[in-house]
Amino acid sequence: MLSEACLLQAAARHHLYKGWDFSQLTSFGDQAWCHLPTLKSERLRATQAQGRQGPELLFYSSGTTGAPKMVCYSLEDLGRVGELCARFARFEGVTEHSRVMVLLPMGLWTVGKITVDGHRLAGAEVFPVDLHGGIETWQRMLDLIRPTVISSTPSVLAAWAPDYKGPRLEMVETTGEPLLDSERHLIEARFGAFVHDAYGLSECVVGTECRVRDGFHYWPDATRVEVLEPYSDRPVPEGKSGELVVTSMMQEHMPILRYRSGDKGCIDQQHCACGHEGPRVHLEGRIADTLVLPRAVKLDASELTTLISAQVAGARFRYKGAPSNPAAPFVEDSFRPALEIYIPSRFTGKREGLRKEMFTALPELAELVHEQELDLYFSTGGKASSVAVSL
Amino acid sequence: MTDIRKAQQSYVSTRGPDWQGELLARLRDDSRFTQQLRGVATWGAIPLGRLVEHSLCSGSAPSSLCYFTSSSTGAPKQVAFSSRDWQQIVAHRADCLAELGLGKEHLAAVVLPFGPWFSGDNLCASLLHLGAGVLPAGLYGPHLPGVARLMANVGVNALITTPSIARNMMRFPSPHPMDKLVLVGEAVSSSIREQLADYFSTAPQCLYAASEAVLGAEVRGEPGVFHWDPDRLHLEVLTPEGRIAETGIGELLVTRRHGNAMPLLRYPLNDLVELAPDIAGGPQFRYLGRSGHGFGLATGVKVGRAQLDRFLDGITSPIHEAHFTVEHALEGDRLRIVLGGSAPLPIPNDVRSRFLASSLDVADTHRSGFLTVEVEPRTVPVRAKRYLQIMETPWRL
């Protein structure tokens, strides 16, 4: 992992941190550190594409306002992130005898690539499988691969669980979205394996669960976590909840310092019953008004409003989604999340244009509608005459 | 003098006069080749290879990364790589990309399928190896408009995709000029090359690779002719007379000089080539098309005759003739299946579902929005032998 000095030098050179004063800083967490600003996703979006340096992999991290948010990794960064993911895998019990089916979005998004890399570095035999195709395809790939471990998102595994036809697994790993207690029970019952959930963002990988499953263990040499008051840069008292703000000690190419995750939670410094020393993060939901869509897709509500109202003045939306509170009951598969767009009755243009613009700005939304994971409706003036739209 | 080094079970052979004999002797010592080399006295007597499940290769290095490739049966075959194999194939592909002029100055969008298919991941790793920037875009129809916008937003100046997808991207309103356009997965005609060159403001160049091996880069100014690296591969052809030769026209046979997890020895790729005699600048071959009857799809997926026969055999209604017509259109491929049979005729939707279920990569192409399938059953007189017709629009070889 990077040293503090190395990370700060990289940040001082990077345009993301233009105007930040690192000169008084002697170590992380000191007074000068606490006076630094925090990094918000809006800034990541606003400062994209300002010149390229050396080999880098660009991942997409959503962005509804037309300027996508991209996260850039150098080869060395990917190696360090992969090493942290390998640490997670070994911690959970993945070995060189494990056959791991990584059923996650491949390509545009970070999570698939780093999960594959992590398990490879942990010595396992890894089979990357994209999410396209749904349950029938996943089942066919499972029959071909015969994995001992599956790594995926909670919503994918919960959707698959009732139809899962395969052997008991050694372990299931989930990541990318809140794991409901009821989803965990369903997945464990149908896949016959213990579920380890992990927590991270496209911008910064954070931690994973042990067998005690009382929070996410994280490693401060790789990730630093602070808890600040939402909408301000003031720290909350120790042990109290607030917005989780993360610093990655893995990324030098595009340093991530004091990044506001939009997640609510707290830090637990007490020793875990598993015996592992080190802090844990407890997640308590989202601070930001976020739509949590299936397959680990998250959309910022205010940005979605900006997108649709830029096309159709006065347009609004309503989203009927699955619950995200961990204690909420699991919603059976007859339920499908729905995004309803209200268009003012004075609007005379074509809805097709708005639909196209939404799908161009948000390829992940296009995918969910195409794969029938999400219903998208347009209605006029909030009346019941909604029209179902499909790709 | 031949120099064959065995480094971590990897064979590297330079081309000396006796290299085949010496390499064969080395291979015979390796338990992974025992079955294929039983009774083989000379290089020429090595039988045709097949993909062996890597777990059956006793003594092989453990595989680290596994992908799938299409097979004649429709059930994908596993292609396994150890960490060292992966490094070697990435380095080989990177050298091919460098031959095509890609380098540090490029930010390349890879619009190709990622896991469980091989090409996307391998190209990304190879581009990074070269020092280029990479946007791993993937290949999924609903994403394409968003990907086109992303490419413009982040300043992509090189595009790597299949000819069909490059054509598909021509429907987007504003042309995005490229410094490099690299095509993989399908052969491409001169008229399509011209169209793409006009739209992307650069002449397309081709890279020839399969999931099992990277073959080579197109020679500048000679469309369809590829340069290959004898230090990494040994290429031969199976001539129409059934003879294995080092020059001439025939089905391409590949021996990979590295490959710990899954060795590849005289492996047929079902491609027809003309292997040229060695010339200054290195050995070359000309791609002539697929060796078996079949057709290709926009994503680079190939559907072979055996796969179609197997699909037809699985239909319970009596089928006496079948016509498969593929039309490569700008927005994707249209496949029309006309089945001639006796009553009871099959139900079109059932046949369509069965066809899509017959192969994971065909189904993937359909779900990605690049293939529509129509089925029409009709009554025809009984035939003694089933008649099969495959037609493909002419732009593709």
Image (cartoon, grey):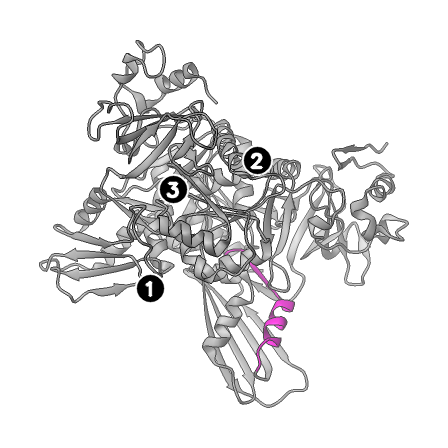
Most extreme residue toward the left, as rendered?
Answer: A346
Q: Where is residue B27 in the image (x, y as percent from the top left)?
A: 82, 43
- Quadrant of the rendered image containing residue A69: top left
Asked if labels 2 and 1 touch by Cβ distance under 8 angstroms, the answer is: no
Does residue A164 appear to the left or right of B73 in the view shown? left
Look at label 3 and name its amino acid. Met
Residue that numbered label 3 is attached to:
B151
User: Real-space Cα distance between discs 2 and 3?
Assistant: 34 Å
Residue that numbered label 2 is attached to:
A122
Residue that numbered label 1 is attached to:
A334
Q: Give B18 or A364, whichever is nearer the viewer.
A: A364
Asked if labels 3 and 2 touch by Cβ distance under 8 angstroms, the answer is: no
Chain containing the residue with disc 1 = A
Look at label 1 and name its amino acid. Ser
- Quarter placement of the C terminus of chain A: bottom left
A215 lies above or below A342: above
